[in-house]
Amino acid sequence: MTVQHFSADASIEEVAAAMSKDGCAIIDALLDLATVEKVRNELEPYLERLSTGKDEFSGHETRRAGSIVERSPTARELVMHPLVSGAAERVITKNNKGMQLHVTQLISIGSGETMQPLHRDQWAWDFFPFPEGHEVMVNCMWALTDFTQENGATRVAPGSSKYQGRDVPPAEETDIAEMKVGSVCLFTGSCFHGGGSNETDQTRDGLIIAYCASWLRQEENQYLSVSREAAMELDEPLQRLLGYDQLYALGYWGDSQHPMEYLRSKPNGD
């Protein structure tokens, strides 16, 4: 089974339907090369000073940089991309109220990296088994370089979102999410996937922007990853997506105030 590919003029409904059916989808050539280059230039200084991972999962030849909204003004456009965020919201809010930004991360897979173990991203909340079909997150891997079988393109298992339990699908049930730079691969939190092995002398760079249901704790603490000074300068829809929003009784600030009032108040809270 292969990942469905869509053109940049696809509808939110088409992409969301593919994710609901298969757990994954690819939208080709969504970003122009100038935008990709701006994101790379903004994030490269942070990536250069990082060490590689310490285990098989994080990758002995892989570097990961977070705080993307703080560090890359251009990447904020990707977070709010209407087709991608719209499809993610359609999947997540089918059984949940509201959506928030879950995690942002630039993942640079270096030469000689081995294959990452297949996993589900919803295992971030491993202490609670979500019911089948209750999707609580969507991950979006933006290709900042070409993704090929040789350089470590993400491996996804279409249809695995419907698997029961924790049994990992065999390798032959995965598809290589090959895509050109500027494309994006979306997969649900229940879809098994993993980074591929890099057999080239170049890095494979992908930008993770993931969303989750508003009632869950975010994997990346956006209130610390994005400074108050930076958050105050953002457009309100992005501020709310970071978590400065209120869902019923969840998320209020101070004396039962809406969290947006925090961003609009003076630094000392007066």
Image (spheres, rainbow, N blue to C red):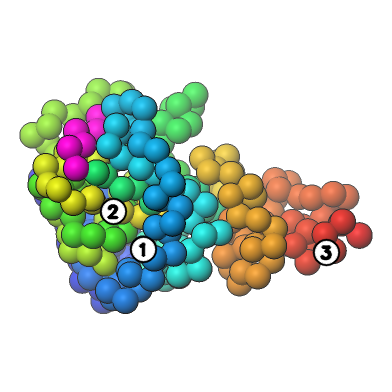
The secondary structure type at the circle numbered 1 is helix
Going by the numbered disc 3, the residue's amino acid type is: Ser
Please say if the residues under marks 2 and 1 sit with CB atoms less than 8 Å apart.
yes
Please say if the residues under marks 3 and 2 sit with CB atoms less than 8 Å apart.
no
Quadrant the N terminus occupies: top left
Using residue 37 as the reference point, say whether residue 216 is left or right of it: right
Point out which mark residue 205 bears. Answer: 2
From the viewer's perspective, is residue 175 above or below residue 178? above
Point out which mark residue 40 bears. Answer: 1
The secondary structure type at the circle numbered 3 is loop
Q: Position of residue 216 (x, y in %)?
A: 56, 41
The foreground one among 218 and 31 is 31
The foreground one among 51 and 187 is 51
Q: Earlier in the sequence, mark 3 or mark 2?
A: 2
Query: How far is disc 1 from disc 3 in space, using C-alphas?
Result: 34 Å
Q: Position of residue 56 (x, y in %)?
A: 29, 27
Q: Which residue range is magenta in the image?
A: 111-119
Q: Residue at x 65, y 70 (%)?
A: 233
Quadrant the C terminus occupies: bottom right
Q: Residue at x 14, y 48 (%)?
A: 201
Q: Residue at x 51, y 40 (%)?
A: 219
Badge 3 is on which residue? 265
Q: Main secondary structure of the magenta part?
A: loop
